[in-house]
Amino acid sequence: NEIIYQEVALFKVPTESLYGEDIIENTVRKYNAKILEVTPVYTVIEKTGHEEEIDALFRQLREYGEVKQFTRSGRIAITKSSTEHFSDYLEALDKYHKE
């Protein structure tokens, strides 16, 4: 594949869900996510990865009833090609597929 792509997602969960059982903390580790901010009221979790990974983490956190807010970037991408302008790369790719 000639494109590297990722998404970024932020999850806001109640900080109290981090206390007691380690379910949320273990889930964050399992999905290789990061805790960005912890306040007495809420905790923000960041997950960078592919759509399927973010969806899986969302489903897992929702199972615990802990997602208060959720947002995602959508796919962001960069080419591996020596073509520096993404639009040029897409045009070349389109020509290739039409041939």
Image (cartoon, rainbow, N blue to C red):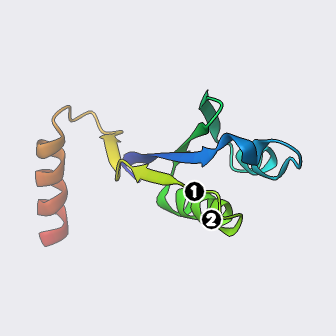
Question: Which residue is more in the foreground, 28 or 77?
Answer: 28
Residue 95 is situated, as x and y percent measured from the top left of the image, at 11, 61
x and y, in percent, of residue 82 in the image:
27, 33
Percent across and percent down for residue 17 are 74, 48
* Residue 13 seen in this snapshot: yes
User: For the residue marked with disc 1, what is the amino acid?
Assistant: Val
Looking at the rendered structure, the kind of residue marked 2 is Arg
Label 1 CA crowd tier, 10 Å (few <14, some 14–19, many 20+)? some
Looking at the image, which is closer to me, 46 or 94? 46
Residue at left offset 68%, top offset 40%:
15
Is disc 2 placed on a helix, strand or loop? helix
Q: How many callouts does the rendering have?
A: 2
The answer to the question of whether label 2 and label 1 lie on touching residues, with beta carbons closer than 8 A, is yes
Against 29, residue 69 (above or below) is below
- Decide if residue 66 is on the left or right side of residue 87: right
* Residue 13 on image: x %, y %: 61, 48
Q: Quadrant of residue 43?
A: top right
Label 2 vs 1, first from the N-terminus: 2
Q: In the displayed structure, does residue 35 sit left or right of residue 68?
A: right
For the C terminus, the image quarter is: bottom left
Return the residue at label 2.
62
SS for dot 1? loop
- Residues at marks 2 and 1, CA–CA distance in whole angstroms: 6 Å
Residue appearing at x 62%, y 29% in the figure: 39
Name the disc covering residue 67, or none. 1
In the depicted view, which residue is nearer to us: 72 or 79?
A: 72
